[in-house]
Image (tube, rainbow, N blue to C red):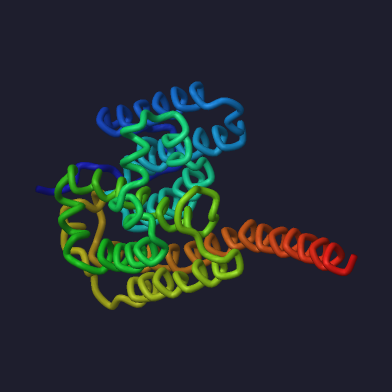
């Protein structure tokens, strides 16, 4: 089956690709978060704002013209990927939804959140491993062709970007309850993941042939093997440069939090030493 989608023009930026299932999930997430916020007294408004921004970015990435062309242009898919895993997911991590669920939930919900499964999934090493494996697996294997050909796999990939990104950045920010790492090690945690995006992006940017045969039928009308390959290479460059840049941006609040933590620790140590001296 040949593609019936026309090449992108800037006036197409007003088009939407509304997916009822995805919109329903976003509405449910918004309702649950609002309900939890209502039940928890003095829930920080900043965290609610982060959650709302995360939903907005998710909507733009999946339901706007970006979502409309994400299976036609590899470069568009990479923009979508960065929006989901490096913009929306960190915003959701800043919104601390597990803390909200723990505060608003029933005793049964709290038992689940205190259980071994959640403890395992939220382990720092598990979060890092998932990120380390998911990025190349979803872009350098035949799974990408399956995603292009099957919409349900495509939707699960979107969910995977959000979940993996959330688990990764919740460790990096260290705001939620549960297992955490030293504030200084959080910078190392984030920087250690940078080579994953760099390697994957460079592998695609330096491709000498189109690695995704599904684009032969899904690329916009008039596409040639040369233009498809050029777009794959552009997508790889976006992942390499854009991914590394966004990771560095994420390091800024982590570094600030580390400095504040060290400052508080120094003040507490000085106070204790003064008390012992007296």
Which is nearer the eye, 221 or 139? 139
Which is nearer the eye, 205 or 84? 84
Which is nearer the eye, 97 or 64? 97
Q: Residue at x 21, y 57 (%)?
A: 215
> Residue 161: where, in percent of width, then height?
35, 52
Query: Which picture quadrant has residue 113?
Result: top left
Q: Residue at x 24, y 49 (%)?
A: 221
Is residue 12 in sight in this rendering? no
Labels in figure, total: 0
Considering every residue shown, the one lying at the far left of the view is: 1
Considering only vertical position in the picture, is 186 above or below 19? below
> Residue 102: where, in percent of width, then height?
43, 36
Name the side, left or right, on which 170 lies relative to 201: right
Q: Residue at x 40, y 54 (%)?
A: 167
> Residue 209: where, in percent of width, then height?
24, 74
Name the side, left or right, on which 134 lies relative to 257: left
Is residue 224 in sight in this rendering? yes
> Residue 169: where, in percent of width, then height?
47, 55
Tell me the quadrant of the picture where the C terminus can be found.
Answer: bottom right
Name the side, left or right, on which 109 lies relative to 98: left
Considering only vertical position in the picture, is 102 above or below 192? above
Name the side, left or right, on which 84 lies relative to 136: right
Q: Residue at x 23, y 65 (%)?
A: 225
């Amino acid at each position: 089956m040949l593609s019936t989608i026309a090449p992108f023009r800037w006036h197409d930026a007003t088009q939407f690709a509304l997916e009822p299932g995805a919109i329903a999930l976003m509405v449910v997430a918004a309702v649950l978060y609002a309900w939890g916020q209502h039940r928890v007294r003095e829930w920080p408004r900043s965290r609610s704002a982060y959650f709302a921004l995360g939903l907005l970015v998710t909507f733009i990435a999946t339901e706007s013209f970006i979502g409309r062309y994400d299976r036609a242009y590899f470069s568009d898919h990479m923009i979508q990927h960065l929006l989901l895993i490096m913009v929306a997911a960190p915003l959701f991590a800043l919104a601390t939804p597990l803390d909200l669920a723990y505060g608003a939930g029933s005793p049964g919900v709290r038992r689940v959140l205190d259980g071994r499964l959640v403890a395992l999934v939220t382990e720092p090493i598990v979060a890092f491993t998932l990120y380390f494996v998911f990025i190349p697996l979803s872009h350098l294997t035949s799974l990408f062709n399956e995603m292009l050909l099957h919409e349900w796999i495509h939707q699960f990939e979107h969910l995977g970007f959000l979940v993996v990104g959330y688990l990764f950045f919740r460790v990096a920010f260290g705001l939620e309850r549960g297992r955490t790492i030293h504030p200084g090690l959080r910078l190392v945690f984030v920087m250690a993941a940078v080579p994953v995006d760099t390697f994957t992006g460079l592998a695609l940017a330096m491709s000498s042939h189109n690695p995704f045969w599904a684009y032969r039928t899904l690329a916009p009308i008039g596409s040639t093997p040369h233009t498809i390959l050029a777009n794959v290479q552009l997508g790889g460059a976006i992942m390499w440069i854009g991914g590394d840049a966004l990771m560095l941006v994420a390091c800024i609040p982590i570094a600030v939090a580390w400095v504040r933590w060290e400052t508080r620790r120094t003040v507490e140590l000085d106070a204790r030493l003064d008390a012992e001296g007296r």
